[in-house]
Image (spheres, rainbow, N blue to C red):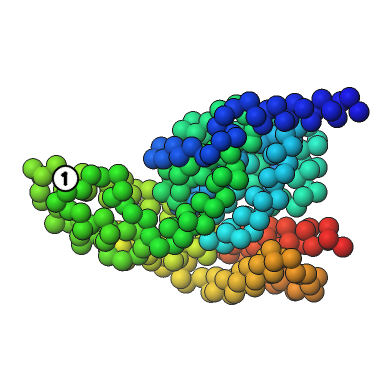
Amino acid sequence: MRTLTTLFLAGTLAAVTAPACIHAAETGKGAKVTYPAFDDSKYIHGPKITASSLKGKVVFFEYWGINCPPCIASMPHLQELQDKYQSKGFTVVGSHRQGLSPRVKQFLEEKNISFPVYQGLDIPAASCPGGLPHAVLIGANGKVVAKGYPPELYDLVKKEVLKAERGLPILEDVELNKYKSLAKTVVSNGSNIESKITPLRKKTDDEEAQAVCAAFDDWLGDAKDMVQAQISTNPLEAVSAITRLKTAVPSVKEFDEALATLKANKDLPRLADINKKISALEQRKAKGRKVAEADLKSLTQAVDKFAESDNEATQTVAANLKKSLSALAASSSDEK
């Protein structure tokens, strides 16, 4: 009993020692995030990820610990966010900050946590101030939106997901005077924005024009990195990502071959259809409704056929879908 009491008090103390973890969320806006290396040696639970796979995603990075009661209490809420927004380019990433023990993985499995959790990872631009839990919300542009006590950030997730869907303002860090109208039109929503930037390239003596061009070039570099990552990790999304980028910046040609290859792959439309069915089941599960075992079995059998393909993109998509189905099956069996 003394041991349990000590653990509870230790966790409670950890949760209240840092003001940043108990007061209103610190904005911390604008800091560009460099994600840590998600080494296998630090992997604990959930899907394995890479820094490149998080490009273009809204990320809720949670510092937590197994001996911290407020951290334990926040886990169901984090899973709700994951279930609700993962199909919209969002993910929770957990960084366990206390001593690693078998209890950590056991807890995550018992609670059906489906987001990635690693041990002792840190974001240099937004480190944990010491107390737990502590969260960092990162926008799709890779910049810190807010940081602080997790519940204070929950309502901001929806806003960031919607912002990413509508298009990110590319010139938000540029002080605009002569070109204020560009703030509303130079947005990553898939419309042609290169045509608005090209005339400014010739204005070499105009500092504001060159600042606009530099901001656009930075965004374009990040956008290309994101597309490249999707080609290898998420071919289903890569087709639409390449198409949107080429519409926004017609001069981009380096993904033409990859786009042609993906479009020629006749497996992808059928896998996309399976993906929609899996997403429907995930949404059903998130609403507390039962997922039929027969549906899971049928979809698993369909995916297994594609997993035997010699095509690398087909194999990648099939592997991703199998992970989603396995998570659904595990959570459904636990409810019985």
Among the 4 quarters of the image, the one containing residue 152: top right
Q: Looking at the image, which residue sits at the far front?
A: 23
Query: How many callouts does the rendering have?
Result: 1
Q: Nearer the viewer, residue 222 or 149?
A: 149
**Residue 179 horizontal side relative to residue 125, left or right:** left
Q: Is residue 201 visible?
A: no
Label 1, on which residue?
A: 208
Identified by mark 1, the residue type is: Glu
**Residue 138 horizontal side relative to residue 82, left or right:** left
Q: Name the residue located 77 percent from the left edge and 50 percent from the top edge.
A: 111
**Residue 203 horizontal side relative to residue 195, left or right:** left
Tag 1's secondary structure?
helix
Among the 4 quarters of the image, the one containing residue 169: bottom left
Q: Name the residue located 40 percent from the left edge and 63 percent from the top edge.
A: 166
Image location of residue 235, percent across then percent down: 51, 61
Among the 4 quarters of the image, the one containing residue 330: bottom right
Q: Nearer the viewer, residue 56 or 157?
A: 157
